[in-house]
Amino acid sequence: MEHIVIIGNGISGITAARHIRKLSNKKITVISAETDYFFSRTALMYVYMGHMTFEHTQPYENWFWKKNNINLKRGYVKTIETKSNTLHFENGNDVCYDKLIIATGSKPNKFGWPGQDLDGVMGLYHKQDLENLEKYAPNNRACKRAVIVGGGLIGIELAEMLNSRNIPVTFLVRESSFWNGILPEGESAMINRHIRNHNIDLRLSSNLKEIKADNNGKVMSVIVEETHEEIPCDVVGLTAGVSPNIDFLKGSDIETGRGVKVNRFLETNIPNVYAIGDCAEQHEPIGNRKSIEAVWYTGRMMGETVAQTICGNRMPYNPGHWFNSAKFIDIEYQTYGWVFAKPKKEEAHFHWKHEDDTKCITVCYNTKTNEFLGINTFGIRMRHEVFNRWLSEKRNVDYVIQHLAEANFDPELFYRFESQILKTYTNHQLQSI
C-alpha cells in the first residue's frame, strides 16, 4: 500500500491528510514535533484570554484519527534522504515514504538581537509559546510590563492578550504607522488610535537594539535603538514576522530558497516530494500574490489541492481572488481583491470612515475602466462569496458601492452604513470630475 508521509500537523498538513483519506485508502502518517493532535493555531490567543481551554482548539476528537486510519507520530525530523525515501529523526528512528508532503509552517523571525534567546522572550506561534506566556506573564504582579517587538497581526494579537490580564504593554513598531506597508494611510492611522485608546504604549518608528538580562538569565529590560531608552520589562514578545521553517532541509537534495521551491502543482524538484502552506515558495508568484503566503486560508487550499494530485487527479494550485481576515483588538478586518497601501498606476482609492473612528472601508478601482479591484473593511462584516463574484464579473466600482447592502453580513438588528457610504462616494465622484 502506498505510504504518504506528511511532516507538520498544521492546517495545511491536516487538510491534505483528510482529503487524501476522503479520496483513497492510502497509508497516511502525520508527523509533528509540537503536539500530539492538530489544533487551531489562530485560537491560541483565546486560551490565554480565558475564552476557551486548549482542548477546545482541537477541531477533532482524539478518536477521529484512529477511526479515519490516519497515523500520528510525535517526533522531530532531522534530515531527509530523498534517494532512499527515508526520514531520519532526532531520536535515531527512521520512517520510509512513497510520497512526502512537507508542511512544516513558519518560525518567528529573529534578527540577531543581543538577548533574543533569554528566558521570558517568546513569539506567539507554538503551543510552547502559550505555555511560556502562562509561566512568565500569568498576571500583572509577575509581569509588570511586556514589550512587543514588531507590528504585524501576531503583534496586535499578543498585545490584546496581555491587555486582557491588565499587563502594561509597550509596542515597538519600526514603521511610521501601524502596518502601513499593507494598509492605506487612513486605515493605518485609525488602527494607531485604536491601539492607543486601549492604553497600549505604541511607539512608532522604533526599533529594538538589545534585550538585557538579570543575574538569572531572564529578561530585565529592552533598549530602544533610536532613543537608547531602557524600558524595564519581564516579557518580550518577538512578532517581527515569520519565515519558512525549513532548517532541517539544509544538505538535502530538495531545492530551497527562502522556502521549499514548488511549481504550480506544489511539486518540488524531487519526484514524489511536495510542499504546502507557509513553508512553500512558488518559483513564480501567482498574479499579485507573494511567492510565500503565510496565510491560514491559502494553507488550507494547498492541502486540498495536493491531495487531488497525490490521488491521481493532478491539479494546479489556483487560489483565486485574494482574501484574508483578522482582528485589531475590537475591530474586525476583511480584505477581498487587491487594495495596496498606495494606489498603483491607473488605480484610485475611495475611503469612508465612520465618525466613531472604529469603522471604515477602502475601495480600490481602475481609473480608466472604473473596474472594482478590491475592498478593505474594518468593523463592518461583508460576505466573501459576494465580493468573489463581483471580482470575477469585473463589476465597476459604481455598481459595487450601490449594491453594498447585498454584501453586508451583519445581523438584522445591526446598524447599517450603506447610505452614508453611498453619499460620501457620490461626493467623492463629483469632486473627481
Image (cartoon, grey):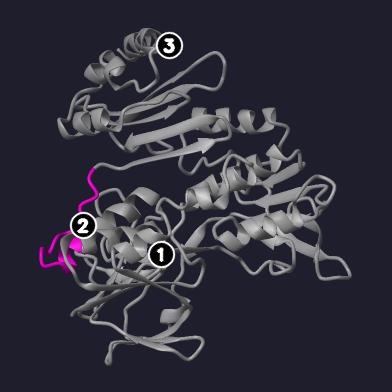
For the residues bearing labels 1 and 2, Cβ distance under 8 angstroms? no
Which residue range is magenta in the image? 306-320
Nearest to the observer: residue 183 or residue 270: 270
Q: Which numbered tag is attached to residue 413?
A: 3
N-terminal of the pair, mark 3 or mark 2, is: 2
Counting other residues with Cα less than 10 Å from the Cα at mark 2, is it few (<14), some (14-19), or many (20 or more)? some
For the residues bearing labels 3 and 1, Cβ distance under 8 angstroms? no
Direction from residue 104 to residue 402 in the image, left or right: left
Counting other residues with Cα less than 10 Å from the Cα at mark 1, is it few (<14), some (14-19), or many (20 or more)? many
Q: Which numbered tag is attached to residue 317?
A: 2
Give coordinates of residue 217: x percent, y percent.
81, 70
- The amino acid pointed to by label 2 is Tyr
Give coordinates of residue 169: x percent, y percent.
73, 43
Helix, strand, or loop for circle 3?
A: loop
Nearest to the observer: residue 368 or residue 30: 30
N-terminal of the pair, mark 1 or mark 2, is: 1
Say which quadrant the C terminus sits in. Answer: top left
Q: Which residue is mark 1?
A: 9
- The amino acid pointed to by label 3 is Leu
Direction from residue 342 to residue 2 in the image, left or right: left
In the displayed structure, 102 sits above or below 148; it is below
Helix, strand, or loop for circle 2?
A: loop
Helix, strand, or loop for circle 1?
A: loop
Nearest to the observer: residue 185 or residue 120: 120
- The amino acid pointed to by label 1 is Asn
Figure quadrant of residue 427: top left
Figure quadrant of residue 414: top left
Counting other residues with Cα less than 10 Å from the Cα at mark 3, is it few (<14), some (14-19), or many (20 or more)? few
Direction from residue 117 to residue 295 in the image, left or right: left
